[in-house]
Amino acid sequence: MRARRSRVVTVAVGVALLVGAQVGGSDRGAVPPAEAATGPTLRWWLTTGPGEALLSPQRTTAFGRDRTGTGAVTVGEEPGQEVVGVGAALTESSAVLLGGLPPAARHETLRQLFDPATGAGISVLRVPLGASDFALDDHTYDDVPPGETDEDLSSFSIDPARRYVLPVLSEALAVNPAVRVVLTPWSAPAWMKTSGTTHGGRLGPVREDVYADYLVRAVADLRAAGAPVVALTLANEPGHEDAGYPSMLVDAGQQERLAIAVRARLDGAGLGDVDVLAHDHNWDDTATPVSLLTGPAADAYAGAAFHCYGGDVSAQSAVAAAVPSTRIWTTECSGGTWSTSWSGDLRWGARHVLIGGFRNSSAAVLWWNLALDPDGGPTNGGCTNCRGVLTVDPATGSVTPSVEYWLLSHAGRFVPRGSVRLPTPERTAAGVESVAFRTPSGGHVLLLLNDAGEARRVPVRWAGRSAVLEVPAGGLVTATW
């Protein structure tokens, strides 16, 4: 993972979040006309960095006579996986910051995040089920005094979500009704665990059934409160525990039993359209998700979820090849101040997460926190140098879009849900990475990264025709036709 705090200019949201960024809907009509040619018009947008290009429209071109040769990106028509969308996590920390903006500024910020025509087009949100390491405090949906238990879940309540997360989610849905939610618990309630705390430890074997009840109750109640939940994982990073923040070890055998129990309860509660996703951990472990997806709980799982903090994105394709019926999600990757290069972050995020994720079977690609403050908080333990998709300064009301915002925008505004991935080459000899899609309306979208150290003329070949794009070193492109 690579990332750093964005160097883009901070603008007071009450005026405009992205002044000069040229991402508004009117910009699509402002692209200069194409030169005469025989094929469809190709429109394209470019990002290289602040002060240069940020999803900026380029001179249109058109498909003409076919051009072959080294470095061509040929777009085929054989359909791959179907796209669910792109997004990030609406943690409690993110919701506190976004919800704390003045109403007009908050609406404008949410429009820039969620509007599919004039904003980033975010359509998927990962919502922690209870507290994560980005929350104001520790909590679950069934907390009782130490030493007590609540086997019938009489103290269960989603009130913690009603404080900050659900109001922001409601406003996001008003901007983009297509937004969908994947739920993830960081820990079971302390009374269900062998450690007696939400920080680390294991789920007690005798609590597996009540934990399954707890998860399904959360899905049902959150849906009733307006959250469009479509997927659920059983634990965030189940192979990792940490004494500093909510976390929980869940071994493979326990994951299997939980998946079977949760699937049965979802179906019985009329929630059969909610998918259960396996793993929700790093790329460096493919054995566990393959085992889960092919073992006794195979029928309970709809897919597997991955994080970017270990291994390589190609692991997703390895799992998809081993279990062709499964749906892959990339559910977490964070930028942060550990990196010192905006352009390096753009390259890494495009190569490994955005283009890399979709090339390697992802139906959905999600970054971590939707918004954090300038200090990378509020935190509840865990990462102290993470960066949000937006940096929101509660002291000034300013909002700064990070490099991850632009990465999301390159797909979210152009690749709607229901699009299918199309074949393109592996990384070309010229250092160009790519992924392509056919949209539900029959249009085509191509994402390109020039990962070379110099500008490239990139021939784009499709249906026996070609168009050539002049892409600067490190440039990220979205092209449509």
Image (spheres, grey):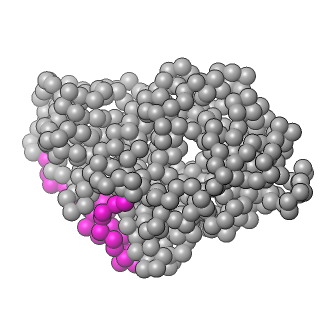
Image mark count: 0
Q: Residue furthest front?
A: 243
Query: Measured from the top left, where is residue 373 in percent x and y?
Result: 47, 68
Q: Residue at position x 61%, y 35% from top?
A: 279
Q: Dividing the image into 4 quarters, which one contains the C terminus? A: top left
Quadrant of the rendering where the N terminus is positioned: top left
**Closest to the observer: 477 or 10?**
10
Quarter location, residue 235: top right
| Residue drawn at the location 46% of the way across and 51% of the way down | 334
Magenta residue span: 5-34
Q: Main secondary structure of the magenta part?
A: loop
| Location of residue 157 (image quadrant) | bottom right
User: Foreground residue, 39 or 222?
Assistant: 222
Q: Residue at x 38, y 39 (%)?
A: 352
Instruction: From the top left corner, tell me how far across and down residue 132 is, in percent.
Output: 63, 55
Q: Quadrant of residue 353?
A: top left
Q: Is residue 170 above or below residue 258?
A: below
Q: Is there any visible trace of residue 44 in the rendered image?
A: no
* Observer able to see residue 408: yes
* Residue 170 located left or right of residue 198: left
- Residue 66 highlighted magenta (yes or no): no
